[in-house]
Amino acid sequence: MSDNRRKMIIEKLNLSTEPFTGTELATYFEVSRQVIVQDVAILRAEGYSILATSSGYIIPKVHGQNRMIKTFVSEHRGFDRMEEELKIIVEYGGKVIDVIVEHPVYGEIVGTLLISNMDEVNKFIKRVDETNAKPLSLLTDGAHIHTIEVPSEKIFKLIKAELYEKGFIKEL
């Protein structure tokens, strides 16, 4: 039964472009959320690339080879600035893959975001607001790194130029 459920979880995640929360999967399979968490852990151990995002579980889809992965260091404080930063990136067609902070004790802490459009920015900001969650960058006095996916080097330069202009990054 559990092997079959895990196969079906992989199938659902592979076929979907949207994440599923643990609660949604638990309801669908008529099990507890904890059972889903255990299933996902087992599937990861078996080699499946399942990401836990703020919106739920997802299996990343492979994009065209013309997209580039880039990183940049950013610094800001405040909820409004976080929203503004994310919107700048997606307005240019970028996808925010993650946020990374370097903690003095725990080392690198990564938060998977996978935000690629305004609707996803708004959902993320709403979720942060409703849960009263604090950004990871609070641990590092605002300093953080973003990994983003962009269609071209030109777009990356445009994103960086606007982030620089708005005071998010210190150098181009």
Image (cartoon, rainbow, N blue to C red):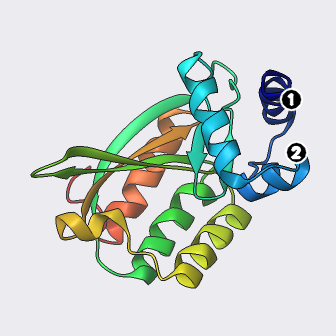
Q: Which residue lies furthest to the front in this view?
A: 1
Query: Which residue: 56% across, 66% down?
Result: 87
Query: Which residue: 60% across, 53% down?
Result: 92
Determine if residue 30 is in view.
Answer: yes
Q: Which amino acid does label 1 sit on?
A: Met
Front: mark 1 or 2: 2
Query: Which residue: 53% across, 43% down?
Result: 155
Q: How crowded is mark 1: few (under 14 residues within 10 Å), some or many (20 or more)?
A: few
97 sits to left or right of 162: right
50 or 100, which is in the foreground?
50
Q: Residue 30 carries which label?
A: none
Secondary structure state at the residue bearing disc 2: helix
Residue 152, relative to residue 110: is it above or below?
above
Mark 1 lies on residue: 8
- First in sequence: mark 1 or mark 2? 1
Residue 98, relative to residue 16: is it above or below?
below
Quadrant placement of the N terminus: top right
Instruction: List x then y, in percent, for residue 40.
Output: 63, 35
Query: Which residue: 63% across, 21% down?
Result: 48
Q: Which amino acid does label 2 sit on?
A: Phe
Instruction: List x then y, in percent, for residue 46.
Output: 59, 16
150 or 63, which is in the foreground?
63
Instruction: List x then y, in percent, for residue 45.
Output: 54, 21
Q: Residue 29 carries which label?
A: 2
Determine if residue 151 is in view.
Answer: no
Rendering quarter of residue 71: top left
Q: How far apart are marks 1 and 2 (CA)?
A: 9 Å
Residue contact at pointers 1 and 2, CB within 8 angstroms: yes
Secondary structure state at the residue bearing disc 1: helix
Instruction: List x then y, in percent, for residue 107.
Output: 18, 43
